[in-house]
Amino acid sequence: MLNAIIENAIDGIITIDERGFVESINPSACKLFGYLPNEVIGNNVSMLMPLPDQAQHNDYIHRYQRTRQAHIIGIGREVKGLRKDGSVFPFRLGVSEVKYSGRKIYTGFIHDLSREKEAEERLKEYAVQLEQQVKDRTQSLQESITALQQAKENLSHSLEKEKELGQLKSRFVSMASHEFRTPLSSIQLSVSLIDKYTQALNNTNIVKHVGKIKNSVNNLTGILNDFLSIEQLEAGKTAAVATAFNVVSFAEEIAEEMQLIAKPSQQIIYQHTGSSSMVMLDQALLRNCIVNLITNAIKYSGENSFIEFHTQLNATHLIVVIRDNGIGIPETDQKHLFEAFFRAHNTGNIPGTGLGLNIVKRYAGLMNGEVKFESKVDQGTSFTISIPVSA
């Protein structure tokens, strides 16, 4: 029965004596190396190894017999094998020492890794290709954004020029909606599939690059959404549609969602003040305002920090306060903060389009509300949205 198991084993099995000469080889090992049994049995097992392992094998056996310090025996590791045709392939080698009839025999168990390595290389190449596609799309979009900003500066001096700028932005948004959304969705789907297929490989490099691609796609999607929001506002397509809802449940749901994207050890703390919680407002506009402000608080605050999120409902107004202890806004920049495409000078390499606060102010205005803020550099920022809740 034992002989039948060895002869039909999927993995290769080879036994050698204390001098390194092959005593037996099963059919799977013969198939892997491309030899017939009689071509291997009686020869030194180093014939199955490429350089430099071939030259060092005998020294390894002698060193082990002398010192009993194992590098492979009883441990196992990934090595390379030499086929009869001269090609080299990777395999997992496990070696056991067996005492039999007063002598020692070494048994090697060989698991071919060729397919796994080929699949890993293909996945690496695919991840690199996708990353390059995202970089190309990012560069293209950044160039378009830069061109749009320059166009605004050049065309904002007269009413006719402003009209031309609006047309240019409309064309850009239309182009971005069609030309970027579809490939971004395709990239996102492909990355998700790569992430799924590489889980079994547990390769940290692939996981890292897949994470980079996902972050880049999410950033591009956010930029595209900001541009679409601005276009709809300027075209008059956005209007407040009030519905009744519980602002506490609404805010708690947002806090839970934003906590998932917070930095390590960042905590979003939500509180509500007021004896009632039902309001009649546009949920979509209010959600966009709150999410924008909390996203900024996350981006511009460090790890191990707190973000305060507070709602207050009185007889006439809903007041939303979002406070962080992040980098703050320089005083010289504060008067321009709600302008489209404006970013404070201390944002550094933190990504952003400069559109978020402009959208927040305009959405609050559609609900007859206002936005105020207080900020000091390196001490944090507090934004307050006040929206009337009377008829």
Image: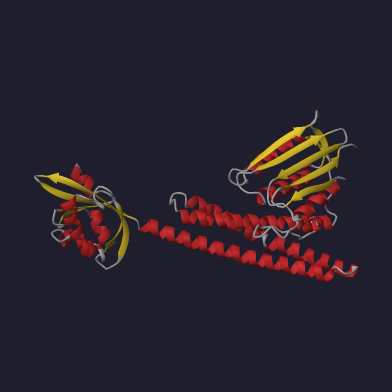
Image-based side of 101 in relation to 108, left or right = left
Question: Number of numbered discs present?
Answer: 0
Name the image quarter holding residue 78: bottom left
Q: In percent of the image, x 72 and y 67: which residue is there?
A: 146
71 relative to 244 in the view: left or right: left
Q: Coloured how?
A: secondary structure
Q: Is residue 169 above or below residue 288?
A: below
Q: Is residue 133 above or below residue 197?
A: below
Residue 315 in the image, given as x and y percentages of width and height: 87, 33
User: Which sits in the foreground, 30 or 15?
Assistant: 15
- Quarter of the figure that contains the C terminus: top right
Q: Is residue 319 visible?
A: yes
Residue furthest left as drawn: 102
Q: At which x and y percent is residue 164?
A: 84, 69
19 left or right of 230 in image: left
Q: Is residue 230 left or right of residue 351?
A: right
Residue lying furthest top: 275
Q: Position of residue 204 (x, y in %)?
A: 46, 53
Residue 66 versus residue 317 in the image, above or below:
below
Q: At 62% across and 57% down in the image, what residue appears?
A: 217
User: Which quarter of the rendered picture does the N terminus lie within?
Assistant: top left
Which of the pair 139/262 is nearer the observer?
262
Nearest the viewer among 196 and 220 is: 220
Task: Choose between 80 and 70: the one closer to the eye.
Answer: 70
- Quarter of the rendering containing residue 59: bottom left
Residue 45 visible at all = no
* Residue drawn 66% across the image and 60% down it: 348
- Residue lying at the far bottom of the rendered structure: 154
Residue 56 image position (x, y, % from top left): 22, 62
